[in-house]
Structures are given as C-alpha cells and as structure tokens.
Amino acid sequence: MRDMTVVDYDPSWPAAYEVEIDRLRAVLGDVIVRAHHIGSTAVLGLAAKPVIDVLLEVRDLGSLDARDEAMQEAGYEPRGEFGIPGRRYYPKGGDRRTHHVHAFAVGDPHIEEHLAFRDHLRERPDAAAAYARVKREAAAKHRYDPEGYVRHKEAFVARTLSDALGRARRRPL
C-alpha cells in the first residue's frame, strides 16, 4: 500500500537526483538527450513526498522501449504511457517509491509543461507555499489513496500550470 505522506524539504534531494541520473545515463546511454529534475523535490524548500522525479528527453520512444529490460534490471518498472500519450513512465521502489522517470521524445509539449510548472514554483515562493498546503491537505485526506491524492491537487495544478505557461511564453528568448 503506497503512503502519500508529505515531508519537509530535504536538502539531499538534488544530490539524490544527480546520483540517479548518472545511473540512468549508464543504463540508457545516448537514448537520453537531456535530463531534468522535476516535481516538488526539485523546488528548494517545498514539502514533498520523498520521491525523486526525473524528466528525460529522449531521441525517440522506440529506442527507449528497446531498453525496458535494462530499466527493469536497474529497478524500474516499465509502465508504458500510463495515462499520458507520448510518455514512458517508470516507477522505482514498488509501494515504497524512491524515483519516478517520465520520458518524452524531444519536442513533446509535456516537457515544456513540466519545466514551466517547476520553474514557476521555484520563482514564486507564494505559489510554492500554497502548493505545499494543498499537498499536505491531500496527504492528510488521502494517505493511502494515490488517486485521491492526485485528484485533490488537480484544480491547483491546472491553475498553476496555466499561470506558469503564460509566464514562460512571455519571457524573452
């Protein structure tokens, strides 16, 4: 049974991301074009479930799919698109998750969304604090219900993503 407990920010999370991305590069090699630390553990000071989210931009999904066995050997469970067209999703750690890998082909619009959301929270402490409150409330109400936890956050995430994309698209290049 997965536990949705949200904890205070842990300053070791960025280093944990770096260790894992080195492992993933060893497993996937030149399939990876770029890698990003995303999710709440990528936002300084933000409370989070202690699961490191990794976003991979890959050359193409077929090349990544061909490495599913290697990902399994590295402890990841290939789950295919898992509800998001064009994504490949790999959780690690079973019910005691440690990492999530979200992979998209270079240029997929989901990449911009994930990075805009993360950057918005990094740049707007008020938004990050509000998100922490929503996450703690979701965890309190849905501690062992991952779907309920996600549903509880949906409206906040949608509003914040809309704001984040608007800000990102207004930035000069």
Image (cartoon, rainbow, N blue to C red):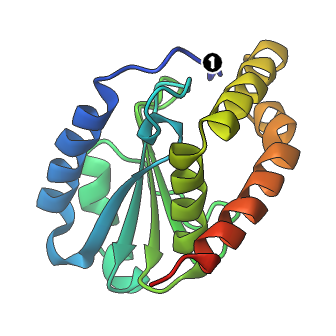
Q: Along the line of sight, which residue is nearer the eye, 44 or 140?
A: 44
Residue 59, position in %: x, y? 32, 85
In the depicted view, which residue is nearer to us: 125 or 19?
Answer: 125
Question: Which residue, given by chain and number where applicable, does mark 1 sit on?
Answer: 3
Name which residue type carries label 1: Asp
| Residue lying farthest to the front in this orientation | 172
Location of the C terminus (image quadrant): bottom left
Label 1 CA crowd tier, 10 Å (few <14, some 14–19, many 20+) = some
Residue found at x 47% / y 38%: 43
Q: Where's residue 17, x and y in %?
A: 28, 41
Relative height, residue 72 to residue 29 (above, below): above
* Residue 67 appears in the picture as rendered: no
Side (left or right) of 122 relative to 27: right
Question: Does residue 117 lie above or below 127 as drawn?
Answer: below
| Residue located at (69% from left, 40% from top) | 127
Give the percent coordinates (x, y) of residue 69.
29, 60
Camera-side residue: 9 or 87? 9
* Residue drawn at (59%, 36%) of the image: 125
Identify the image quadrant of the N terminus: top right
Asked if residue 62 is positioned above or below residue 119 in the image, the reply reads below
Residue 138 location, x and y as percent? 79, 24
User: Would residue 165 be found to the left or right of residue 145 on screen?
Assistant: left
Closest to the observer: 50 or 90? 50
Quadrant in which residue 31 is drawn: bottom left
Quarter-of-image position of residue 36: bottom left
Secondary structure type for disc 1:
loop
